[in-house]
């Protein structure tokens, strides 16, 4: 069974990480560019663009830092990412991840006036 990582193919940083993950994964992880999805509404795609999403082979969804840790678990480096989900560290990581994801999204997809309001 395969898990699927949904990523933003128009984000240079995201594309770089996906290229690396494709190269070093041990199998079992598929990749879907959110911009290429046909069976999703515009609202669904926009929500997915705001945070990284991974759907495992059982149909469970992982979002944000959880998705990152799950994606890297398909590589030999997965153990290095597990501490990001430890209770105290995980809470801090979630705050930083959310701030980074929000900034990335608005920087890529919104006008300069919108960016100024978000800051």
Image (spheres, grey):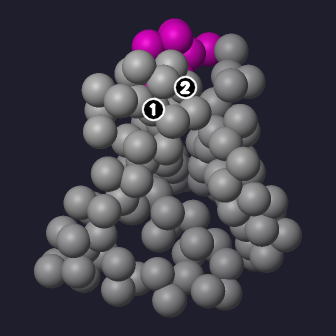
The residue that disc 2 covers is 109
Q: Which residue is mark 1?
A: 106
Visible residue check, residue 28: no
Q: Secondary structure at mark 1?
A: helix
Relative height, residue 95 to residue 90 (above, below): above
Q: Quadrant of residue 23?
A: bottom right
Q: Quadrant of the C terminus?
A: top left
- Image spot of residue 17 (x, y percent): 69, 62
Report if residue 76 lies within the magenta region: no
How far from the left and from the top, in percent, is residue 32?
70, 39
Residue 42 magenta-drawn? yes
Q: Residue at x 67, y 87 (%)?
A: 76
Quarter that holds the N terminus: bottom right
Seen from the viewer's position, the closer of residues 9 and 73 is: 9
Residue at left offset 32%, top offset 51%: 98
Q: Main secondary structure of the magenta part?
A: helix
What is the span of residues highlighted in magenta in the rendered image?
39-47
Measured in 3D between alpha carbons, the distance from the residue under mark 2 to the one under mark 1, in whole angstroms, is 5 Å
> Vertically, is 63 above or below 91?
above
- Tell which residue pokes out farthest to the left in this image: 88
Residue 119 shown left or right of residue 63 in the figure: left
């Amino acid at each position: 069974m395969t898990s699927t990582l949904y990523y933003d193919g128009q984000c240079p940083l995201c594309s770089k990480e996906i290229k690396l993950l494709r190269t070093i994964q041990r199998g079992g992880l598929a990749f879907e560019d959110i911009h290429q999805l046909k069976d999703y509404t515009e609202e669904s795609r926009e929500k997915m663009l705001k945070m990284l999403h991974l759907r495992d082979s059982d149909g469970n969804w992982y979002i944000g830092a959880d998705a990152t840790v799950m994606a890297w678990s398909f590589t030999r480096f997965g153990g290095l990412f597990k501490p990001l989900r430890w209770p105290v560290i995980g809470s801090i990581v979630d705050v930083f991840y959310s701030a980074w994801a929000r900034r990335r999204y608005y920087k890529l997809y919104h006008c300069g006036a919108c960016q100024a309001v978000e800051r």
